[in-house]
Image (spheres, grey):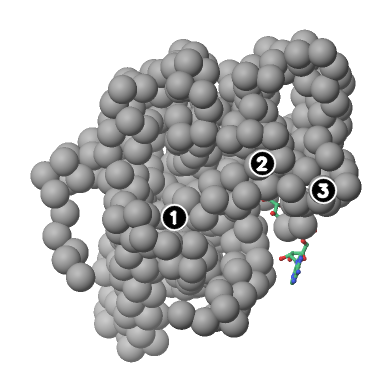
Amino acid sequence: MDFSLTEEQLLVQRTARDAAERLLAPKAAARDVSGEFPLQELAELAELGLLGVAVPEALGGAGMGPIAYSLAMMELGRGDASVAVAVSVSNMVAELIATNARPEVARQWVPRLVNGELVCGAFALSEPESGSDAAAMRTTAEKRGGTWRLTGAKQWITSGDRAGALVVWAVTDVAAKHNGITAFIVPGDAKGLTVARLEDKLGLHGSSTAQLVLDGVEVGEDQILAGVGRGFSLAMQALDGGRIGISSQAIGIARGALEQTIRYAGERQTFGQPIIKHQAIAMMLADAATWLDAGTLMTLRAAAAKEAKQPFSQLAAMAKLFSTEHAWKICDHCLQIHGGYGYVRDFPIERALRDVRATRIYEGTSEIQRLVIARNLLRGP
Ligand SMILES: Cc1cc2nc3c(=O)[nH]c(=O)nc-3n(C[C@H](O)[C@H](O)[C@H](O)COP(=O)(O)OP(=O)(O)OC[C@H]3O[C@@H](n4cnc5c(N)ncnc54)[C@H](O)[C@@H]3O)c2cc1C
């Protein structure tokens, strides 16, 4: 396998790194306290092409592939995990519409998602009573004449209160079960769409997480993605790709924490020497660096398979499982190495630990990744 990156991929990586260091990292601690939504930052990232890295150029995107996207997400995760999750979901939504809407509908939405005019996109699949078991959703869509009326509630929707465009899943045929779910594009200002509450989370304070209510929201037939009844498989495909983004985000958070910790361990002295000289600390750092490298390679391998249009569902599930579980362990090691200073807000480590925790839950919990992996094993090669 060739691990060398192209000039274009390196350019995207440099652009994202520079944006993360210049625009995101300096404000990340303050945003964690204030919970302020990163409106200005998203606009600037849109200007740099980072809201549509893998979106075709014809629709205003950068026209790059999943590898460049993964590299960008790693950098943004290192800068500010809250902004990174909004960017990740928005890229996923833009790609979903670009590849599954009618051409004129894609032209209506995607360029404005990518250039920041719509702020960002949101992915509205989960509900109060259905997360892992997405097919158990209760939101319905009923056809009346040429329009569909959506009624129900969506839970945990990243940027749900800010997004200019949402993809919302609803049941269109109860009897057809998985084949009776349809994905609709819903404008953020649609009549009947309201924010019922914003969640008060452990971490990712700069990312808003909304409960949404749909009360007879009217959507045109042309705003259906991939066709009536195709929504469930579309969601599963989108999540396969989304898992590469979340795996990358976790790697970025862990990398930032580890870099900070290596610096700290070289400076902090106990018993007459820097703590990095104590073997117990050096071993923790060695484990963390090894996990980080393995997670990075697994993530880029899944992205390379997607880029080569090969099956990548298994690789993405394995990458997300490994990277997010180990990113959590890395951040925990980093906190331990900081001693008491790791537990307070003066250092960025406790924020990294709180932020990274969500990556083991969203876009499929670790348990669900294991189910996906095991199912693929049982199917055989
Ligand atoms: C910060 C944040 C942002 C999010 N953003 C979005 C978003 O933008 N859009 C969106 O649609 N959703 C979003 N989610 C929702 C997220 O995807 C769900 O929380 C996740 O899929 C789990 O669903 P649940 O919370 O209902 O847990 P449940 O499905 O109720 O699961 C509870 C526990 O049971 C386990 N479990 C469930 N089924 C099985 C099984 N068959 N075998 C073994 N264990 C099982 C789970 O792993 C978990 O540990 C977000 C969540 C968070 C926390």
Q: Which residue is mark 1?
A: 244
Q: Which residue is mark 2?
A: 231
Q: Which mark is residue 176?
A: 3
What residue do we see at 35% from left, 85% from top? 283
Q: Nearer the viewer, mark 2 or mark 1?
A: 2
Q: Is mark 3 within 8 Å of ligand 1?
A: no
Q: Is residue 297 left or right of residue 200?
A: left
What residue do we see at 61% from left, 75% from top? 375
Spatial CA distance of label 2 from label 1 is 20 Å
Q: Nearer the viewer, mark 3 or mark 1?
A: 3
Q: Amino acid at mark 1?
A: Ile
Marks 2 and 3 close (CB-CB < 8 Å)? no
Q: Is residue 264 above or below residue 84?
A: below
SS at badge 1? helix
Q: What is the x, y in percent for residue 63?
A: 28, 33
Q: What is the x, y in percent for residue 197?
A: 80, 30
Q: Is residue 74 left or right of residue 89?
A: left
Q: What is the x, y in percent for residue 357?
A: 59, 58
Q: How many marks?
A: 3
Q: Amino acid at mark 3?
A: Ala
Q: Is mark 1 within 8 Å of ligand 1?
A: no
Q: Quadrant of residue 206?
A: top right
SS at badge 2? helix
Q: Is residue 240 above or below residue 105?
A: below
Q: Is residue 9 left or right of residue 210?
A: left
Which residue appears farthest toward the bottom when viewing the image? Answer: 279
What residue do we see at 78% from left, 21% from top? 148
Question: Within 10 Å of the Cα at label 1, are there few (<14), some (14-19), or many (20+) other Cα atoms?
Answer: many
